[in-house]
Image (spheres, rainbow, N blue to C red):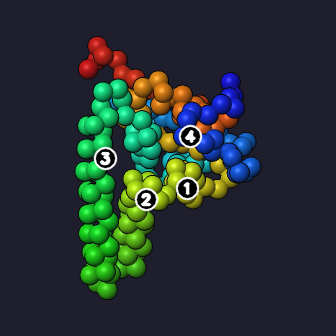
Amino acid sequence: MPTSETAPGVLPLTEGHADLEARTLLFCIGAPECGTTRLLDYFQTHPAVHTPPLRQVRYFDFAFATRGQERKHADVSARKRDEIDRRVEVARQRIQDKSAKWSPEKVTEAKEALRVLEQRQGLRHGTLSYLDVLTDGLGDEAVICDASPSYGMLGVEAFAAMRSTHTRTKFIFVMRDPVDR
């Protein structure tokens, strides 16, 4: 059921992007070790589904901390930002140092890995929008998939915000059988 209401601080994805209105935004969520990565691997090969190069966008993890975890979340976010910044610098330096010795394919692969790291960095620092990351490389696919299993740990407010980011939003929540575990 589409909604025109948007959670505070969250803009609908389609605002100003008429080319996205007819597409479906699919959130693939799940418990740890329940098969969400396998499902994402399948979606990456499906011609009607776009998955961004950044495998787990995790945008809503950092936009919505669960109750009682705001301080812990802020500490973790700061450490994650620092770690990502460090990884980006190491990757840039490595490409600069090794590119003359690498094959052109290896250089291209390393630059793509750096680009994906820079997307994560841009999301963490607020210099890159969720929409920019989600639609990176988007063609004519009918479905845009954000497969971030960790979203399953978020609260009601986060799910309301996720639902209101687009008029055509669907969720797949993958669960495991607790008896089998």
Disc nearer the start of the sequence (4/2): 4
Does the CB distance between marks 1 and 4 fall below 8 Å? no
Picture quarter containing residue 84?
A: bottom left
Q: Tell me the crowding category of disc 1: few under 14, some 14 to 19, or many 20 or more residues within 10 angstroms, Cα based.
A: few
Disc nearer the start of the sequence (1/4): 4
Q: Is mark 1 on a helix, strand or loop?
A: helix
Report the residue marked by disc 2: 122
Report the residue marked by disc 4: 10
Q: Tell me the crowding category of disc 3: few under 14, some 14 to 19, or many 20 or more residues within 10 angstroms, Cα based.
A: some
User: Relative to residue 86, is residue 13 depicted above or below?
Assistant: above
Observer-nearest residue: 10 or 147? 10
Report the residue marked by disc 1: 132
Of the residues shown, which amino acid type is indicated by label 2?
Gly
Q: Is mark 2 on a helix, strand or loop?
A: helix
Cα–Cα gap, marks 1 and 2: 10 Å
Depth check, mark 3 against mark 1: the one in front is 3
Report the residue marked by disc 3: 77
Of the residues shown, which amino acid type is indicated by label 4?
Val
Cα–Cα gap, marks 3 and 4: 19 Å
- Quarter of the image that includes the C terminus: top left
Disc nearer the start of the sequence (1/2): 2
